[in-house]
Amino acid sequence: MNEDSALEFFTPHGLEDILNFQVRPTPHFLENQDRMELYQTRLSKKNWQEKWKNLIFKNT
């Protein structure tokens, strides 16, 4: 929230994924397979799909 109590979003990769309930790896994780494995492990541990049924997970 800013000084006026308004929400501010930092979206370096755009708002499209947020508005469409999509979760995808950042370019950092897409750089190599080891990072993608770490990304997948983190997703599994967070169990977001159980909490938020409408999320769509992408690997690109």
Image: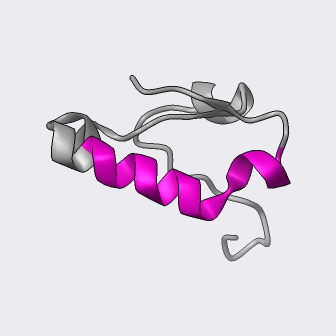
Q: Is residue 32 above or below residue 5?
A: above
Give the residue displayed 56% in from the left and 63% down from the top. Answer: 45
Q: Is residue 4 above or below residue 7?
A: below
The x, y position of residue 7, in whole percent, is 73, 60
Is residue 12 or residue 35 the one in the foreground? 35
Residue 44 occupies quadrant? bottom right
Q: Is residue 28 above or below residue 41?
A: above
Left or right: 57, with 52 as reference point: left
Find the magenta span and give its range.
36-52
* Residue at the bottom extreme of this rendering: 3
Left or right: 44, with 34 as reference point: right
Left or right: 10, with 29 as reference point: right
What colouring style does the render use?
A: one colour
Which of the image's four quarters has the C terminus? top left
The x, y position of residue 14, in whole percent, is 50, 32
Secondary structure character of the magenta stretch overall:
helix
Which of the image's four quarters has the N terminus? bottom right
Q: Is residue 20 above or below residue 28?
A: above
Tally of numbered tags: 0
Give the residue displayed 72% in from the left and 33% down from the top. Answer: 21
